[in-house]
Image (cartoon, coloured by chain):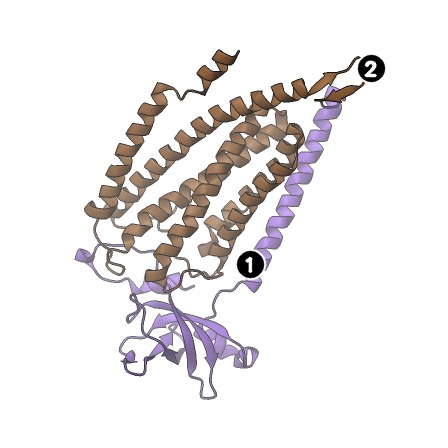
Chain colours: A brown, B purple
């Protein structure tokens, strides 16, 4: 048992290889963003911050979406692994949305002339980060794995419900944050082709980073869940007197 | 670990929860939308102010518009920036204390914070840039005024 568990703690070889590929692609993305792509007619070289900011924001949205998807699956069929996957995705969602705000502030100070303002888009993003923090606070307060999974799943779904508002905030409300440059309904892209290509490549790399950490965190989460189940089975030892003794 | 009601009872309860959940989320979403669209109007346009100036009297407001061409004057000794802000219908004189931000120029979108004085000059102490979602390389560099104007709506 012990040796088997220790063996499973090891990160598989293919994941190490995948990490190396991601680092190489990240370097290519940085080259595209910092050197190859042209400066913007208005912003000059400041446009280069956009490739990091927007790609991270998009993958943060994807991470929130997957969190809610696995959370909903957990509510539906109560499979422990769905909760493990939801947590893994939620951690990445919190990381990516925090980085979105940090990158956004970096970008907005020189271009929009302020670090922060409470317009609809920024407010919704701040709310998203706050709710994701709440997700982990709620989890830390509940011991029963099933209840913990259910309560936090509801939080995850609420976060996901804010996504369409956030995504379309600049279209629906007057904001300082610029509108989308890429319309998913096919009505056009208001971005030079080289810029679009750079943004999409960096988004692809950010997606790979997300996927890598998802796989790794789910691997660890599976072990955590096994450990927790074993510990609880061990703690609840039936005593000779007929009651339950907590060890 | 969990109670085991009959198969049909469980499915029925699940469906009920699902319907309730969707209902609650829908209501919450609608209320968020209402709150954001009514109380979070981030800035008003010059013509909206002109329609009802009394409504904004003695109140700090955010005014959004474009910097009118050939209207910009900057006194770099007193750090006084003056320009005309316009939405294509109405324009107002703006006096801003501070230096112009890097992306400030004619036809740029701006959001200014401050108050109107007695002679309808907007006294601004915070000048923000609202740039459009159009990004292009300088080689084929013209600025699409219509797209800029659109971005202010």
Residue A56 vs B145, above or below: the answer is above
Q: Position of residue A66 (x, y in %)?
A: 49, 34
User: Where is residue B138, by image quadrant?
Assistant: bottom left
Residue B23 vs A73, above or below: the answer is below
Q: Nearer the viewer, residue A129 or B16?
A: A129
Which residue ends up furthest to the bottom in the rendered image? B119
Is residue A94 left or right of B107 when viewed as pictured? right
Q: Is residue A187 visible?
A: no
Badge 1 marks a residue whose secondary structure is helix
Q: Chain of mark 2?
A: A
Is residue B76 left or right of A144 when viewed as pictured? left
Is residue A89 left or right of B6 when viewed as pictured? left
Badge 2 marks a residue whose secondary structure is loop
Q: Position of residue B145 (x, y in %)?
A: 30, 65
Q: Nearer the viewer, residue B121 or B125?
A: B125
Q: Position of residue A201 (x, y in %)?
A: 29, 39
Q: Residues within 10 Å of mark 2 (few under 14, many from 20)?
A: few
Is residue A154 left or right of A44 when viewed as pictured? right
Which residue ends up furthest to the left in the rendered image? B139
Q: Is residue B64 visible?
A: yes
Quadrant housing the C terminus of chain B: bottom left
Q: Nearer the viewer, mark 1 or mark 2?
A: 2
Task: Report the residue marked by disc 2.
Answer: A241
Picture residue at 46% right of the left edge, 48% below the top = A167
Task: Report the residue marked by disc 1.
Answer: B36
Picture residue at 47% right of the left edge, 24% below the top = A219
């Amino acid at each position: 048992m012990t040796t088997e568990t220790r063996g499973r703690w090891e990160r598989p070889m293919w994941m190490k290889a995948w990490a190396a590929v991601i680092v190489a692609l990240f370097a290519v993305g940085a080259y595209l963003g910092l050197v190859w792509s042209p400066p913007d007619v208005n912003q000059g070289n400041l446009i280069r911050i956009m490739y990091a900011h927007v790609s991270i924001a998009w993958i943060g949205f994807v991470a929130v979406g997957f969190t809610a998807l696995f959370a909903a699956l957990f509510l539906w069929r109560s499979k422990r692994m769905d909760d493990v996957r939801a947590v893994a995705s939620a951690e990445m969602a919190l990381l990516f949305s925090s980085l979105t705000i940090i990158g956004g502030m970096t970008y907005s100070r020189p271009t929009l002339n302020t670090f922060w303002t409470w317009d609809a888009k920024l407010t919704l993003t701040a709310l998203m980060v706050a709710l994701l923090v709440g997700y982990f606070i709620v989890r830390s307060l509940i011991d029963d794995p099933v209840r913990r999974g259910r309560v936090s799943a509801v939080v995850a779904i609420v976060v996901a419900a804010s996504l369409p508002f956030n995504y379309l905030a600049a279209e629906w409300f007057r904001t300082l944050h610029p509108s989308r440059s890429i319309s998913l309904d096919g009505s056009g892209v208001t971005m030079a082709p080289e810029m679009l290509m750079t943004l999409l490549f960096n988004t692809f790399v950010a997606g790979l980073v997300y996927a890598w950490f998802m796989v790794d965190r789910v691997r660890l989460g599976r072990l955590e869940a096994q450990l927790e189940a074993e510990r609880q089975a061990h703690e609840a030892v039936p005593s000779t007197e007929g009651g339950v003794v907590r060890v | 670990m969990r109670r085991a009601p009959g198969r049909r009872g469980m499915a029925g309860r699940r469906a009920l929860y699902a319907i309730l959940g969707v209902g609650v989320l829908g209501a919450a979403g609608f209320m968020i939308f209402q709150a954001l669209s009514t109380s979070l109007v981030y800035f008003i346009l010059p013509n909206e102010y002109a329609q009802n100036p009394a409504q904004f009297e003695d109140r700090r407001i955010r005014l959004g518009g474009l910097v009118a061409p050939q209207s910009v004057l900057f006194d770099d000794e007193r750090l006084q920036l003056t320009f005309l802000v316009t939405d294509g219908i109405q324009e107002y004189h703006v006096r801003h204390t501070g230096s112009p931000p890097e992306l400030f120029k004619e036809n740029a979108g701006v959001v200014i914070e401050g108050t109107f004085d007695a002679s309808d000059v907007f006294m601004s102490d915070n000048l923000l840039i609202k740039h459009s979602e159009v990004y292009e390389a300088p080689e084929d560099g013209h600025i699409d005024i219509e797209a800029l104007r659109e971005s202010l709506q």
